[in-house]
Image: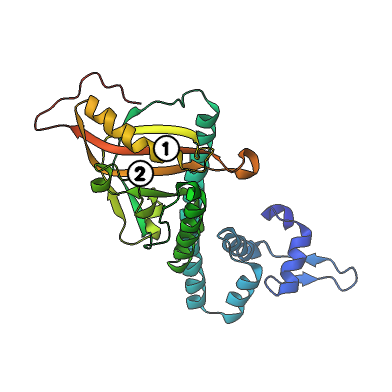
Amino acid sequence: MAAANGVSTRLLRYYQELGLIEPAHIDKMTGHRFYDLLQSDAIDMVRELQGIGLSLDEIVAIVTSGSLRGLHDAVLSRRDMIVEEIRRLEIARDIAMSMVESIERFQGNDITDQILFERAPASSMVVFDIPAGMAPQDDVRKGREEWERVLRFVKAEMIERDYPLELFRNISCAVPCERVVRGDHRATYAFVRLTQEMEAYVQGATPIPAGLYLVYYGREMYLPSGEGFATHLIPRFLDYAQAKDLEICGDYYEEILCRWPLLLGDSQKLFRVSVQVRPRGNGGKLKEIGCI
């Protein structure tokens, strides 16, 4: 019977202990258990329910109740759990792929101190407004401490909103467009860029428009003084855009793509800063722009 159903004799005995499948006959002299081949259907049912993740205890409870409704409710609940698990695994897959890409980019030689162009597709983000006074930036040497306070605030907000903490690794900050054009680098909100799977976990996602972006990739987040290196890029972006006859038309995003302080220390992080641009005036054309 065990061989015919691809299970062990020990498992058959365990099924009996649980009261799931009783042998058709037990030899009183030898204790040997004999089964009817038609009992294979019962084994199939148990294995099928185990296959979708129900425990033997749950299966015993269903069988004991003798209720088809009980089976329906248990399977329906398990289905919902599987759907949720798939979503979380999709997020984990995206994070793993992003980490591999970031490690390869960090180790490669394509990150240089230069401004590049990227054509980005539309995406979305969840926004966390930074409370006034939390990161005053009145002392640029305290940029790291100020940003760490913001990170802890956002993490608490994520817990309050019941967001998966897997999203925490992607927390970034942004400067509104109107401040960028004034050369003001003070961030007013933090955000998490979302994948399609991640959007299922948040409400009211904010769109990030598709288009042409000025982009800079770097490894060193802070200068020896403690000042954030990325803050020096807003004036450079403005000068570069003017030289290319472009205008800033979107918010300035500063994103940490990966951070591994136990391996790289506190200051080294792969980061990307970007701002959307467009040709200045109506009908302008971009010339000799190489995109990555």
**Is label 2 in contact with label 1 (beta carbons under 8 Å)?**
yes
Residue 39: x %, y % from top left: 65, 65
Q: Where is residue 246 in the image (x, y as percent from the top left)?
A: 20, 30
Q: Can residue 21 be seen in this view?
A: yes
Q: In this view, does 150 lie above or below 179?
A: below
Q: In which quarter of the image is the C terminus?
A: top left
Type of amino acid at the residue the image marks with label 1: Arg
Instruction: Name the foreground residue: 34 vs 140.
Output: 140
Taking the image as shown, residue 60 lies to the left or right of residue 80, namely right
- Which part of the image, by quadrant, shows the N terminus? bottom right
Query: Which color mode does the image show?
Result: rainbow
Q: Quarter-wise, where is residue 216 in the image? A: top left
Residue at the image point whose x is 47% and y is 77% from the top: 69
Residue shown at the point (74%, 71%) measured from the top left: 16
**Which residue type carries mark 2?**
Tyr
Q: In which image quadrant can residue 190 be found?
A: bottom left
In space, the residues marked 2 and 1 are separated at their CA atoms by 8 Å
Residue 272: which disc? 1
Q: Position of residue 123 (x, y in %)?
A: 32, 45
Q: In this view, does 209 lie to the left or right of 71?
A: left
- Is the residue 127 above or below the residue 99 in the image? below
Say whether residue 119 is visible.
no
Left or right for 32, reference 143: right
Q: Which of pointers 2 and 1 lies earlier in the amino acid sequence?
A: 2
Residue 114 or residue 75, whichever sits in front: 114
Q: Which residue lies furthest to the left in this view?
A: 282
Residue annotated with mark 2: 253
Q: Residue furthest right?
A: 29
10 Å crowding of disc 1: few (<14), some (14-19), many (20+): some
